[in-house]
């Protein structure tokens, strides 16, 4: 059985949000021997692996890790020291950690393709066969295809939703209060009358709760990620790699609509830099963007967690994409002194139900209990206690081995399985761009996108003025060279498929 726990706020990996600070990056790396820490238990030869994770640390992290480490020490010969970095800081801090060669063991990947080709991540091709063959057996082929780099595997992806859609998710508090009918919402432009109504009556509510990580999504699949704006338009020519910001491509109307909403006050005025939390179960927001896949059973997951009758409307297609295949990749640092133990830990997380369910649902008997039927569980009142928390599964490990809520019906499970079997694959899935000839250009483009992206995506910048500047700087950074190289390789990839 699979189950996908989601982030509740926006970010660059499919709309993220929650932010937690980690002091300073230097404080994490000051001790070069952190990944060589030894367990405080009787077996002092068991290494403690430094494990970087994104998001807000559970308040009972020590309790969760203590239980998990008893299992890992026995089954994998290692323990983990999980360090959380907030959503708003994660990508930047991990880039610093990676480029500086800091000695860590396991981390959620950022800029996966580029870092893999630069040698920052350990080659797991043979290591995974030897120490994680069970995990490889679980993975849908789309995860393997989407993560092979020059014929090698550098990540253990989380088996979750093999495909997903972007959703506009609505807070039922305001839908009910103002009797709003959103049944015909299909695109960003359709939100306007609803945003207007709520904004005029609820001026202190983030009508469209965009933040610094917000990216309005459309039916495209990036060849690397959104930091290099080159993609295949899933609604257009599947053989052409485009820059979605160029004239004639459909991102421009979205940017103009976002700017219109920003000027109307529907978007928080500090959105481009904001890391403000908008808890899903609260009433500080009206519309947010969520990623939803078949294992979420529609809005069921959000409804159960929030206690609200959440309603979502899809605005992208349900397609297996590179982005989805790389949604949550765990990598082992090439500088790790414990690669074998790290691989064993990842395998254990992906194959041991006792271990994973204990981390995702919290302490058994305190926050949840088994029902004795078909790997179903019942959540107890303490599950929602803010002092007894748990981890998310979408960015942890194999959702196949998570127990299901007892309220999920067999019919829902059957429908989910059928949807996953029928899902179409992106034309670019399996194409892994060799960036060796354009590494400098990619770095330069990343810097330009970091400068303009947040302002454009949140509507803070006027696209009529900013996009021409943006495109000019992208040209100077070398995006055309990247595009030409990518198109050449993609043409060869397509010809080999025929």
Image (cartoon, helix red, strand yellow):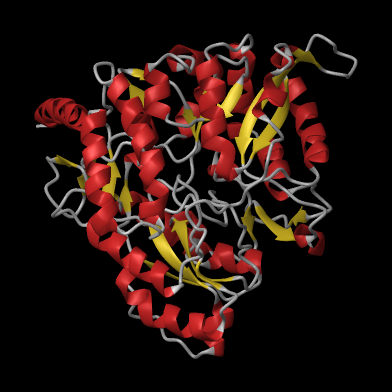
Q: Residue at horizontal 80%, vertical 35%?
A: 67
Residue 238 image offset from top left, x and y in percent: 14, 44
Looking at the picture, does residue 126 appear above or below residue 365? above
In the rendered image, the quadrant that contains the C terminus is top left
Above or below residue 265? Residue 469 is above
Query: How many labels, in total?
Result: 0
The answer to whether 404 is drawn above or below residue 492 in the figure is below
Instruction: Tell me if residue 187 can be seen.
Output: no
With respect to residue 267, does 350 lie above or below?
A: above
**Rendered residue at 52%/13% (across/down):** 334
Q: Position of residue 99 (x, y in %)?
A: 50, 19
Q: Nearer the viewer, residue 271 or 341?
A: 271
Residue extending furthest toward the right? 42
Residue 55 makes an appearance in the image: yes
The residue nearer to you, when weighing 414 against 140, is: 140
Image-based side of 342 in relation to 440, left or right:
right
Residue in view at x 46 percent, y 29 percent: 137
Give the percent coordinates (x, y) of residue 114: 37, 24
- In the rendering, at what x and y percent does residue 83 appear? 69, 32
Q: Nearer the viewer, residue 235 or 325?
A: 235
């Amino acid at each position: 059985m699979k189950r996908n726990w989601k982030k509740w706020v926006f970010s660059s990996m499919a709309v993220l949000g929650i932010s937690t600070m980690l002091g300073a990056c230097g404080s994490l790396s000051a001790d070069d021997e952190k990944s060589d820490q030894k367990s405080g238990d009787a077996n002092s030869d068991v290494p403690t692996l430094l494990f970087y994770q994104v998001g807000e640390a559970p308040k009972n992290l020590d309790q969760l890790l203590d239980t998990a480490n008893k299992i890992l020490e026995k089954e994998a010969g290692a323990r983990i020291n999980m360090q959380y970095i907030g959503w708003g800081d994660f990508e930047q801090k991990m880039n610093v950690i990676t480029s500086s060669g800091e000695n860590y063991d396991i981390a959620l990947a950022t800029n996966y393709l580029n870092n893999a080709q630069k040698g920052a991540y350990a080659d797991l091709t043979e290591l995974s066969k030897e120490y994680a063959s069970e995990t490889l057996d679980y993975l849908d082929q789309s995860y393997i295809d989407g993560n092979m780099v020059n014929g090698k595997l550098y990540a253990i992806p989380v088996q979750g939703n093999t495909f997903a859609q972007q959703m506009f998710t609505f807070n039922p508090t305001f839908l009910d209060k103002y009797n709003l009918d959103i049944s015909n919402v299909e695109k960003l432009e359709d939100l306007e009358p609803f945003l207007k109504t709520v904004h005029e009556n609820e001026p202190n509510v983030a009508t469209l709760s965009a933040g610094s990580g917000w990216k309005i999504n459309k039916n495209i699949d990036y060849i690397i990620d959104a930091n290099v704006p080159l993609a295949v338009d899933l609604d257009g020519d599947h053989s052409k790699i485009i820059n979605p910001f160029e004239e004639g491509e459909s991102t421009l109307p979205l940017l103009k609509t976002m700017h219109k909403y920003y000027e109307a006050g529907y978007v928080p005025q500090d959105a481009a830099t904001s890391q403000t939390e908008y808890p899903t179960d609260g009433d500080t927001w009206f519309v947010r963007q969520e990623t939803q896949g078949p294992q979420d059973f529609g809005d069921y997951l959000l409804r159960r967690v929030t206690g609200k009758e959440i309603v979502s409307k899809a605005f992208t297609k349900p397609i297996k994409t590179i982005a989805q295949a790389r949604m949550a990749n765990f990598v082992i640092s090439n500088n790790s002194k414990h690669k074998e133990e790290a691989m064993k830990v990842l395998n254990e997380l992906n194959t041991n139900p006792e271990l994973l369910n204990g981390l995702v649902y919290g302490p058994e008997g305190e926050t949840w209990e088994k029902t004795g039927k078909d790997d179903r569980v019942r959540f107890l009142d303490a599950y929602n206690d803010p002092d007894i928390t748990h981890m998310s599964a979408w960015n942890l490990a194999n959702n196949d081995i998570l127990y299901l809520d007892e309220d999920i019906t067999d019919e829902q499970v059957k429908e989910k399985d059928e949807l996953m079997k029928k899902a179409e694959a992106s034309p670019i899935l399996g194409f892994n761009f060799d960036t060796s000839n354009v590494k400098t250009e990619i770095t330069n483009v990343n810097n330009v996108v970091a400068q303009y992206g947040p302002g454009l995506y949140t509507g803070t910048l006027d696209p009529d003025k900013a996009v021409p500047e943006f495109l000019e700087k992208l040209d100077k950074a070398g995006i055309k060279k990247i595009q030409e190289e990518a198109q050449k390789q993609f043409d060869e990839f397509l010809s080999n498929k025929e």
